[in-house]
Amino acid sequence: MSTPEAPDGFPLNPLERFIHDLHERCHGTGIFTCVVRLQGRLEPEPLRRVLAAVQRRHPLLRACLTKADGVWRFRLV
């Protein structure tokens, strides 16, 4: 699955900018938090394969956010 992309990424919409500006002002104190509780032994390699498959299926999970000159942009990596 291929996703077109502008060479310098895409600008965020107003809500995305607000969320990331808030996250920046709060010094990254938990706006984007995910807790997973696992029981038993965790095998790293199968977990890597599953997470890679999820990233391939959902391109926005590969989004890289940057801020330059006060402007947020994202691109897919």
Image (tube, grey):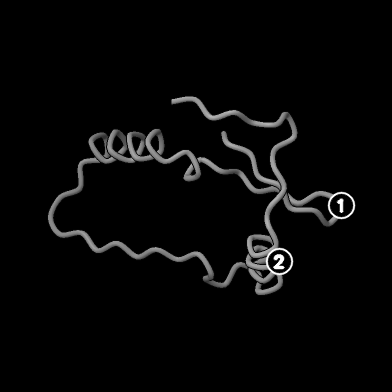
Quadrant the C terminus occupies: top right
Residue at which label 2 appears: 21
Image: 43 above or below 28: above
The residue furthest top is 2
Q: Quadrant of residue 38?
A: bottom left
Picture coordinates of residue 36 (x, y %)? 29, 62
**Amino acid bearing label 1:** Asp
Image check: 47 left or right of 65? left
Q: Quadrant of residue 10?
A: top right
Quadrant the N terminus occupies: top left
Image check: 29 left or right of 11? left
Look at 71% across and 72% down and name the residue there: 25
Task: Between residue 8 and residue 14, name the one nearer to us.
Answer: 14
Say the numbered circle drawn on residue 55: none
Please rate how many residues cluster around mark 2, counting C-alpha atoms within 10 Å: few if below 14, some from 14 to 19, many from 20.
Answer: some
The residue furthest right is 69
Picture coordinates of residue 2 (x, y %)? 49, 25
Task: Between residue 61 and residue 38, name the one nearer to us.
Answer: 61
Residue at which label 1 appears: 69
**Amino acid bearing label 2:** Asp
Picture coordinates of residue 11 (x, y %)? 72, 48
Look at 15% across and 50% down and name the residue there: 41
Image: 40 above or below 15: above
Instruction: Label 2, secondary structure: give it.
Output: helix
User: Which mark is first along the chain, 2 or 1?
Assistant: 2
Picture coordinates of residue 49 (x, y %)? 29, 33
As measured in the structure, the alpha-carbon distance from the residue carrying label 1 to the one carrying label 2 is 13 Å
Instruction: Label 1, secondary structure: give it.
Output: loop
Image: 11 above or below 59: below
